[in-house]
Image (spheres, rainbow, N blue to C red):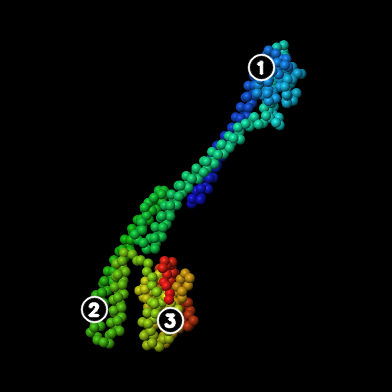
Amino acid sequence: MRRTLAVLMVAVTSMVALAFLVPLALIVRETAQSRALAEAERQASSLVPVLALTTTAGDLGLAMARTAAGRRGHLAIHVGGSRTSGTSRAPAAEVARAASQTRASTIELKSGYVLLRPVALEGGRSAVVEVFVPAADLNRGVFSSWAVLTGVAVVLVIGSVVVGDRLGARVVRATRRLGSAATALGDGDLAERIHPDGPPELVAAATAFNAMANRVTQLLTAEREMAADLSHRLRTPLAGLRLTLEQLGPQAEASKQALTRLEGEVDAIISAARRPQRAATFCDAAEVLRERLTFWSALAEDQQRPWQLIGATLPVRVPVPAGELGATVDALLGNVFRHTPEGSAFTVTLHEGKDSVGILIADAGPGIRDPETAIERGASGAGSTGLGLDIARRLAESTGGTLRLDRSALGGAQVQMWLRIRALKKPLRRP
C-alpha cells in the first residue's frame, strides 16, 4: 500500500508540476528574449540624438563606441542607404525596407536577431540603426531559471512522496494491528482487543472487531456454562448407576471400571468448560496410542483379533490434549470392534511427516461402501451413527488437518486422521 501511494503521489505531483512549470518555462524564455530586444531598442534609441546632430563617419564611430553593443561590434548605422558605419549583418534589402518604415523591425538570422531602427533626418533623408542581438543574449539566464524550476519540481515530488508515505504508514500500521488482533483472536486469545486508530473507516472496522470479540466471548462463556450444567446433570444418574453396580457384587467389576472412567470424562468436560479459554496443549501421540492399545488389547484377545501398533516407539508431539486424542482413538477403535466380525485383524499406524502427523487405523472388515458420503454425512453405514468419524474429523480440523477414508491393505476400511503440526519453541527431545 505504501509503495502504491508513493507511485500515485509521484504521478499526480508530476502532472501538476508539468502543468504549471512548462508554461512558466516558456514564459521565462520569452521574457529573456523580450528583455534582450528591449535592450537593443534602448541602445538604438540612444543614437537618435547623435544622428540629429551629425552624420559624419568619425562622429558616428565615437558615438557607437560609447555603447555596449558598439564595443562588442554588434552595432551599425546606415545613412542614406549608401554609407554604413560599423559591422552590418542585415541584408541590404531588409535595411532598405526598414528605411521606408516608421517603426523598428526585427529580422531572425541563424546566429540571432537584428533590430533595425529607422531614423528620419533633415532634408528628407533617412538613416537606419542596426543592432545585432546574439542567440546567447536571447537565452541569457533561461537555462539557470529552468534548472531552478526543475529543482522546485523535484522538491515538490519528493515532499509529496514523503507526505503520502506518512499517510500510508498510518493506514498500514492500523491495518496490521487489526490483522494481528484478528489472528490472535483466531488462535484462541479471547482477551485480544484493538485500540481504534487511523482513518475513519479503519476506526469503524476496529470498533466492529472489538464488538465482535466481546460477542464471541459472551457466546463461548454461555456455551461453557451450558456444557458444565449438562455435565453436572449427568452426575445424578451416574451416582445411581454406581449404587446399582455396588449391589451386583464382584461380577460387575468391569462395569464399575467403565463407570469410573465415564465419571472421569465428565469431570474433564466440566473442568474444560470452566476454563476461560483453551491454551495450546501438546501431547505425545505415541504414548497415547500405546496406552489405548493396551486398554483395547484385552477385548481384542477375547475376540481373537490380531492387531499391531506401528511407528509408536519414539515420541511424536501433536498439538492436541492427550484426553481428546485418547477419546478419538477410542471412538475409532470402538467402530472397528462394533462393525467388523470377531476375529478381524486391525492395525494402528503412527506416521510423522514434515508438516503433519497421521494416525491410520485399518481393519480387515467389510469396509465402507461410500467413504465420501461417510465423511460428509458422518455415517459409515451398517447401522453406524458416525459419531466416531465426526469426533475424529473435528479433532483433525481443529489443528488444520483432515480426515480421510480409504480401502486398507487388510481389505477393509482405513481411517486416516492427519493432525497438522505447528511450530514448537521447545521440541520434544528424543532419546
Circle 1 residue: 48
Residue 99 in picture, x, y percent from top left: 71, 19
Label 1: state its secondary structure: helix
Q: Measure how far apart labels 1 and 2 are at the Cα level.
A: 135 Å
287 up-or-down from 224: above or below? below
Circle 2 residue: 240
Q: Measure how far apart labels 1 and 3 are at the Cα level.
A: 122 Å
Q: In this view, does 329 lie to the left or right of 124?
A: left
Res 309 label: 3
Foreground: disc 1 or disc 2: 1
Which of marks 2 and 1 precedes in the sequence? 1
Residues packed near mark 1 inside 10 Å, few (<14), some (14 to 19) or many (20 plus):
some
Residue 361 visible in this rendered orientation of the protein: no
Q: Measure how far apart labels 2 and 3 are at the Cα level.
A: 38 Å
Residue 162 in picture, x, y percent from top left: 48, 45
Foreground: disc 2 or disc 3: 3
46 up-or-down from 413: above or below? above
Amino acid, disc 3: Leu
Which of marks 3 and 1 precedes in the sequence? 1
Residue 40 visible in this rendered orientation of the protein: yes
Foreground: disc 1 or disc 3: 1
Q: In which quarter of the image is the C terminus?
A: bottom left
Q: Compare residues 396 and 107 and report the one nearer the observer.
A: 107
Q: In this view, does 57 lie to the left or right of 325?
A: right
Amino acid, disc 2: Gly
Residue at x-position 29% and y-position 70%: 270
146 up-or-down from 338: above or below? above
Residues packed near mark 2 inside 10 Å, few (<14), some (14 to 19) or many (20 plus):
few
Which of marks 3 and 2 precedes in the sequence? 2
Q: Is residue 12 left or right of residue 330?
A: right
